[in-house]
Image (cartoon, rainbow, N blue to C red):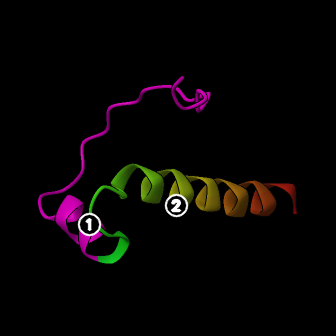
Amino acid sequence: MGRPPLKVTLVHVRLPIGTPERIDAVAGKNRRAEFIREAVEKELKLREKKAAD
């Protein structure tokens, strides 16, 4: 029995040189995807709120 599915879509993005290493430095090893998911959700909520005002 494995982990339950995350219900996610695989998306490839290109990041500037050095950005993945910066993410790893603040988020920790093996936490890059989680960091990016959280950052995207935070930014979407901010922009959606601005668009609704």
What residue is at 68 percent from the left and 58 percent from the top? 47
Secondary element under disc 1, as helix, strand or loop, is helix
The answer to if 50 sits in the magenta stretch is no
Q: Amino acid at mark 1?
A: Asp
Task: Tell me if 43 is positioned left or right of 50 in this view.
Answer: left
Give the dominant element type of the magenta stretch: helix, strand or loop: loop
**At which x and y percent is residue 34?**
46, 53
Q: Amino acid at mark 2?
A: Ala
Magenta stretch?
A: 1-25
Task: Tell me if 45 is positioned left or right of 6 in this view.
Answer: right
Which residue ends up furthest to the bottom in the rendered image? 26
Which residue ends up furthest to the left in the rendered image? 17
What residue is at 26 percent from the left and 66 percent from the top? 24
Q: Nearer the viewer, residue 16 or 8?
A: 8
Q: Which residue matches tag 2?
A: 39
Secondary element under disc 2, as helix, strand or loop, is helix
Crowding near pointer 1: few (<14 within 10 Å), some, many (20+)? some
**Quarter of the picture holding the C terminus:** bottom right
What residue is at 44 percent from the left and 54 percent from the top? 36
**At which x and y percent is residue 45?**
72, 58
Q: Which residue matches tag 1?
A: 24
